[in-house]
Image (cartoon, helix red, strand yellow):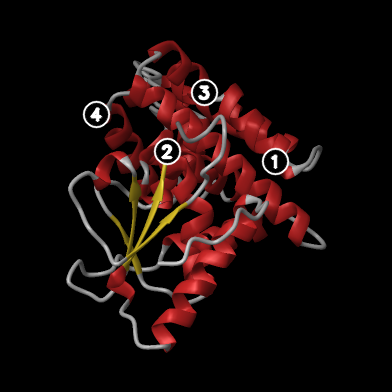
Amino acid sequence: EKILNHIAFNEHDEARFIAGEITRRVRDGANFSDFAILYRTNAQSRVLEEMMLQYAVPYRVLAGLRFYDRKEIKDIIAYLRLIHNTSDAVSLKRIINEPKRGIGAASLEKAEAIAGEEDKDLFEIISFANEYSELSRAAIKMVGFAQLINSLKKASNGSSLSDFVARVLNESGYMAMLELENSVESKTRIENLNEFISAVTEYEKSTEEPSLGGFLENVSLVSDIDAYDEDQDACVLMTVHSAKGLEFPVVFLSGLEDGLFP
């Protein structure tokens, strides 16, 4: 393969170049499965994945999860969805104890039962948990969680969307939980969350009237796409570490720059 001269790309230009190059070569007879895109850290896959979708290039992430399938990304999205719509019981149940708040599964099940009996939203029951004797053990913690969500809901209109997401991560205690853990895994999860904030910033820059609801709609378009079958003709995204021993006709090394790639 001819090695291209160095071109000063930012991550979006680079991802666009890679997607365009794959598309061009497939038109000339190559298979999508001929291509591998390598990067140093998992957080780098986010921009690449979104550009693959934009160019309709089928892909799969080897030895890792797609960006929007990662736990910490699902958790922050659940926070944002609940803040945007407190009737979203699925999101509420996902993050009411993330980080740990001492609200057990049994207490949550009782709250769900009450919500069903009274035909009310689960969030409403949790907001007034101190009025139900069945919830006495977890009432203070449930009400505290509801107050947190309501406080963040009020704050959602007072700052930029990216600043607001950072505030959610901090005031929820989620970022502090990862920092306290101080492990290789938690540091990777923090990297992914910082990359998520970058995605929010990009949305703000590319949208005339950015809003939390609009951003969540954009996220749904990306994250709801079904995973590709591993036997499908698709290019592969993975870390350099995961690529040891594998061979591909065409390999792209993304983010090959000082301070990021050893």
Which class describes the residues within 10 Å of circle 2: few (<14), some (14-19), or many (20+)?
some
* Residue occupied by mark 3: 175
Viewer-proximal residue among 235 and 189: 235
Q: Amino acid at mark 4?
A: Ala
| Mark closer to the chain start, 4 or 1 | 4
Disc 4 from disc 3: Cα separation? 26 Å
Helix, strand or loop at label 3? It is helix
Dot placed on the residue nearer the N-terminal end, 1 or 3:
1
- Residue 227 or residue 115, whichever sits in front: 227
Alpha carbons under labels 4 and 1: distance apart: 35 Å
User: Mark 2 sits on what residue?
Assistant: 41
N-terminal label among 3 and 2: 2
User: Gap between marks 1 and 3, in whole Å?
Assistant: 15 Å
**Classed neighbour count for the residue bearing mark 1: other residues with Cα under 10 Å, few (<14), some (14–19), many (≥20):** some
Tag on residue 162?
1
Earlier in the chain: of badge 1 and badge 2, it is 2
Q: Are marks 1 and 2 in contact (CB under 8 Å)?
A: no
Image location of residue 184, percent across then percent down: 35, 21
Q: SS at mark 1? A: helix
Is residue 219 something one can see in this rendering?
yes
Per the model, the C-alpha gap separating discs 1 and 2 is 22 Å
Quadrant the C terminus occupies:
top left
The answer to whether residue 221 is visible is no
User: Which mark is in front, 1 or 2?
Assistant: 2
Residue at position x 22%, y 44% in the image: 244
Q: Could you say where residue 224 lies in the image, as x and y percent from the top left?
A: 41, 64
Secondary structure of residue under mark 2: loop
Placement of 56 over or under 79, stated as above or below: below
